Image: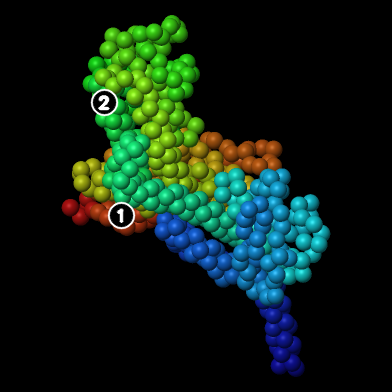
Amino acid sequence: MIEKILIVILCILVVVLSTLLWLRYRKTRNVVILDRIAVNELLAAFVNNLRRGKIQDIAGRVSHVLRKHLGCDRIVFLRSFKGNLELNYVSGVKRLGRKDFRVRISQDIQARLKAYHHISAISELSSLFSGEYLKRLRGLRLKYFFPVFVKDQLYGLYFVATDLPLDNSPLRFLTTALAFNLSTAYYMGSQEQQLRNYESRVKSLETTKSKAAAKAVSTGGGELARLLKIRNSARLTTELVEMLRKDCEFSKMIFCVRPDNPDETLISVNWHIVEGIDKKCRESFDELMSKTESGKICIVKDLGNFGGPVDDCIKQLRDGNIKYLTTLPWGSDRKAFLAWSGRMMVGDVSARLSNFRNEILPLIENAQRLERTEAMSYTDGLTGVYNFRFFEKRIEEEFDRARRYGRPMALLIIDIDDLKIVNDKYGHLAGDCILKSLARTLSASVRTNDVISRYGGDEFCLIMPETSREQARVFMERIRDTISSMPCRMEGAVEKHSYSVSIGGAVYPVDADSIDSLIHAADMALLKAKSEGRNCAKLAEAQLSQKM
């Protein structure tokens, strides 16, 4: 009798266990687990291919990721070409006619497609494309789409089929990241093509025998080839202005221009200028720009009274024997101020300035575009701070500098406490609000030479050059207290939500003698802070100093 009872109980347990396993399978079968390091390596590979201009490699990798990581067994990519969407790539689909999928794309459709920032259902396109066109897509069992934009222009449209639901977070994240990287690759590829065009022009300049053509450009082919290799716009500005000074034979010169980043100081280049005039011009730069007609060469002594600091600047120019001034376009949406004296006639200077604008200034525009694109690849899309790739680059630079000059450097790892609970309770949008709030607080609290980056997930890193253990300790406590006393208003919530962080820190050379050991020491200090109840800041134990 007892044996029968035990057998019945065992059978019941088997049924219960099988039911639990089946429910767990139902719950997790559509879950995609993303490895942070794998994603970082993928993005790094994108940028490496991107710098070599291999857009086909990027597109191939996009399709590979869609198939391998998101289970997309059918992929169709339509690329924008001469106002149409043309069939460009297919995977898992047979017997596809190119003409059947060609569709005209108006500016209105482009503008409406730009509103789709994430992967969406094909049914959303019912107001953009004909019912017959959508029927063809559904006939191929395609479920979702996501657009790829390059600046404001549609580059293409991806259609995919996967068993993952539309609200699957990895699906939304990876497709958005893939679209961004394909967009960046195409944009930088176009910039590289412009550079190749310039290099081709240089070769023609070097081989041409026409003296008139050689005279039209204010510098030789070899010099232009050297300038093409300069990717830093500030350094290129200095080189170009010096070249202009020699070409126009200025005996005295003041040049000022505002950099791309409005928070940075003006770029200025001077030649034989009395001390004080340059400072006055920089202080009056914005007013000078607003009161000077673009491209017109003005005689300084004939300028009237404008009022305010501009008059003081013009007086100093007269006293410094500066005879002429003008403004020049300098890159996209910016103007530069140029004042000078020299023996060359104004008409000849005007002609050379015109040649300079037409032949040389596109180099500045190209350098600025490349800088902006590179900055995009180093920025975390959600929080606006630097990403893990930039952290890897800068920690090597700052560590080498600290070791070379024998100065301390602190590394802090900041982790949001219980962010997973917030995500599970309020949704991922609420967690995103906290991440952005922390990024804003950190950005407002650090020095200009400190480097904030998102380390991954709910962790941020802060590199602090020339910071001792005591300075790091004081900062850690201050920022921890600031964050815990500043609640965050989450999207859709009426009340603000308080949150806290745990911080681990380590300082070179006291706590570590290499980059890896510094990161490890800060990580161990973070674990200790977590183990002591969260909302806590801990410095690593000074192991190296104890050994000494």
Which label was assigned to residue 515? 1
**In the image, residue 523 above or below residue 262:** below
Q: Is residue 195 left or right of residue 86?
A: left
Label 1, residues with CA under 10 Å away: few <14, some 14-19, many ≥20 = some
Sequence order check, earlier mark of 2 and 1 = 2
List x then y, in percent, for residue 21: 67, 76
Q: Is residue 49 left or right of residue 141?
A: left
List x then y, in percent, for residue 107: 69, 45
**In the image, residue 234 above or below residue 193:** above
**In the image, residue 257 above or below residue 342:** below
Quadrant placement of the N terminus: bottom right
**Would residue 263 be visible to someone looking at this image?**
no
Q: Amino acid at mark 1?
A: Ile
Determine the residue positioned at 82% across, 59% down. 131
Residue annotated with mark 2: 249
Q: Quadrant of residue 101?
A: bottom right
Structural distance between the alpha carbons of marks 2 and 1: 51 Å
List x then y, in percent, for residue 265: 37, 28
Q: Residue furthest right?
A: 131
In the image, 516 versus 482, the foreground residue is 516
